[in-house]
Image (cartoon, rainbow, N blue to C red):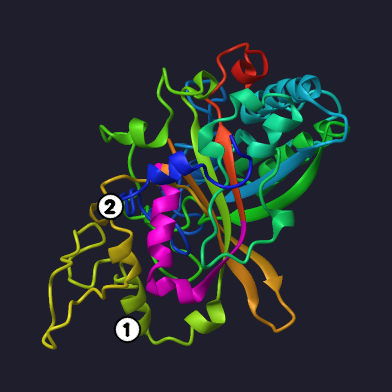
């Protein structure tokens, strides 16, 4: 299998499959996982017991799937990619995944890391901490495991909105950290980075955030930095097709990926100065939904199905043909879906005084060739939102299934 570019066989497999998943605000758009649900807001009128429970909330490390995929979105997140150090191979990677898995299990249970713990999170509970591990395409050649590399890790094609920084893209290993307390999240990041010393070094690292649980009087779908409600129709684990869309089935190939998923990570900068020059009606036409409550322009509530054929007094369709909500609808994309679980980010202001801010887009699927890739191609052909976003970094990683008690993440690959 070629290491560069998608194989002809897999490209042919997408012929006629224009948009087999949901898209994203700024790139394969779709719908974000719901944030964790505290019972009330902080401050006057809020619940002190709800606040106390935030720190006590614990996510299980062991299971069929890794944590951080269907885990409710946390308020703080770190995404980090590592490259194996010169001379490090399969043996060293195995030892590292053992260390990392043991540390993740301890930290997610609210216990200190083994060895010299920094005590950053000493006063906090687990705070819904989750740690997720994945492998990039380059990991397999670095460890002599080329024959175990999944076809789904063929490099993503180029897209018209790409302005990718290679130094902040891809990587041998990928780690996602989420928590509802920033100190707990940082503590986990620092512990894993310290334990990688001598085996792997940080290639890139990004920090993100979401609305804090309890920040609103009642649970609401979160908003992105464009002010748009973002997360209305994410596929739900209760749906009968959820597992087949999101997770590699038992008996799938390669066998070590059973229960796993493929994640596409994109740093999508929102060109907020340009976006904020638009009037409200213009912004709503770009998205195809009302900004106030996320309802479609054809009326109803946030969860009302849009009437794509409805026309206005001028004879034109109410939801423009290039509206983001129209292009990314599942019934416009073969019914397939990606599970979106993004974070917003803000990295200050550039030399022009423009905000370096946007979306750390994270989407999960059983196969990116049936998820992210065909939808992003469709967006490339005429999404009105494309004028206001720029993809600046990208990565694709194989995230194996969860570790059973006594196992570490990736054991079936590294010891198979």
Q: Quadrant of the C terminus?
A: top right
**Of helix, strand and loop, which mostly describes the magenta segment?**
helix
Residue 269 screen position, x and y as percent: 58, 67
Instruction: Kindly give the residue lying farthest to the front in the view shown.
Output: 8
Residue drawn at x 26%, y 73% is 321
Q: Which residue is mark 2?
A: 330
SS under mark 2 = helix
Residue 287 screen position, x and y as percent: 35, 71
Q: Is residue 269 magenta?
A: no
Q: Which residue is mark 1?
A: 281
- In the image, 309: left or right of 96? left
Residue 113 or residue 197, whichever sits in front: 197
Residue 199 screen position, x and y as percent: 84, 31
Are dots 1 and 2 in contact, CB under 8 Å? no
Q: Which mark is residue 309?
A: none
Q: Quadrant of the N terminus?
A: top right
Residue 168 or residue 72, whichever sits in front: 168
Mark positioned earlier in the residue sequence (1 or 2): 1
Examine the rendering and report whether any part of residue 38 can be seen: no
SS under mark 1 = helix
203 up-or-down from 239: above or below = below
Tell me the magenta residue range. 370-393
Residue 328 screen position, x and y as percent: 33, 59
Residue 179 or residue 87, whichever sits in front: 87
| Distance (Cα) linking label 1 and label 2 | 25 Å
375 up-or-down from 149: above or below = below
**Displayed quadrant of residue 398:** top right
Examine the rendering and report whether any part of residue 251 can be seen: yes
- In the image, 226: left or right of 167? left
Mark 1 or 2: the one toward you: 2
- In the image, 96: left or right of 307? right
324 up-or-down from 58: above or below = below
């Amino acid at each position: 299998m070629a290491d560069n570019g998608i194989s002809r066989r897999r490209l042919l497999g997408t012929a006629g499959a224009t948009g087999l998943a949901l898209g994203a605000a700024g790139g394969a758009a779709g719908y974000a996982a719901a944030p964790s649900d505290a019972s009330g807001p902080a401050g006057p009128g809020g619940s002190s017991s709800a606040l106390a429970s935030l720190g006590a909330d614990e996510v299980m490390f062991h299971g069929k799937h890794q944590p951080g995929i269907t885990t409710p979105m946390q308020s703080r997140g770190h995404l980090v990619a590592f490259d194996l150090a010169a001379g490090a191979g399969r043996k060293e990677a195995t030892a590292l995944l053992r260390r990392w898995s043991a540390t993740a299990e301890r930290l997610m249970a609210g216990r200190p890391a083994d060895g010299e713990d920094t005590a950053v999170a000493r006063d906090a509970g687990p705070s819904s901490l989750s740690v997720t591990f994945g492998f990039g395409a380059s990991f397999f050649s670095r460890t002599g495991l080329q024959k175990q590399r999944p076809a789904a890790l063929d490099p993503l094609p180029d897209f018209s909105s790409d302005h990718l920084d290679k130094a902040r893209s891809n990587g041998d290993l990928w780690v996602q950290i989420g928590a509802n307390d920033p100190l707990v999240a940082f503590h986990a990041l620092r512990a894993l980075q310290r334990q990688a010393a001598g085996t792997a070094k940080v290639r890139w690292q990004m920090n993100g955030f979401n609305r804090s649980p309890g920040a609103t009087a009642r649970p609401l779908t979160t908003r992105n930095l464009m002010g748009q409600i973002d997360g209305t129709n994410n596929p739900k684990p209760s749906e009968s097709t959820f597992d087949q869309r999101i997770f590699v089935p038992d008996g799938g190939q390669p066998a070590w990926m059973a229960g796993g998923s493929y994640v596409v990570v994109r740093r999508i900068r929102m060109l907020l100065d340009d976006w904020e020059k638009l009037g409200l009606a213009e912004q709503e036409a770009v998205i195809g939904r009302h900004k106030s409550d996320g309802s479609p322009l054809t009326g109803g509530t946030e969860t009302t199905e849009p009437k794509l054929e409805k026309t206005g007094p001028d004879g034109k369709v109410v939801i423009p043909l290039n509206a983001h909500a129209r292009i990314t609808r599942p019934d416009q994309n073969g019914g397939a879906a990606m599970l979106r679980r993004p974070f917003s980010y803000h990295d200050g202001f550039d030399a022009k005084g423009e905000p370096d801010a946007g979306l750390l887009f994270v989407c999960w699927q059983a196969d990116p060739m049936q998820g992210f890739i065909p939808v992003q191609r469709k967006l490339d052909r005429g999404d009105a939102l494309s004028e206001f976003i720029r993809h600046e970094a990208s990565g694709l990683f194989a995230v194996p299934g969860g570790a059973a008690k006594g196992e570490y993440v990736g054991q079936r690959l590294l010891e198979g």
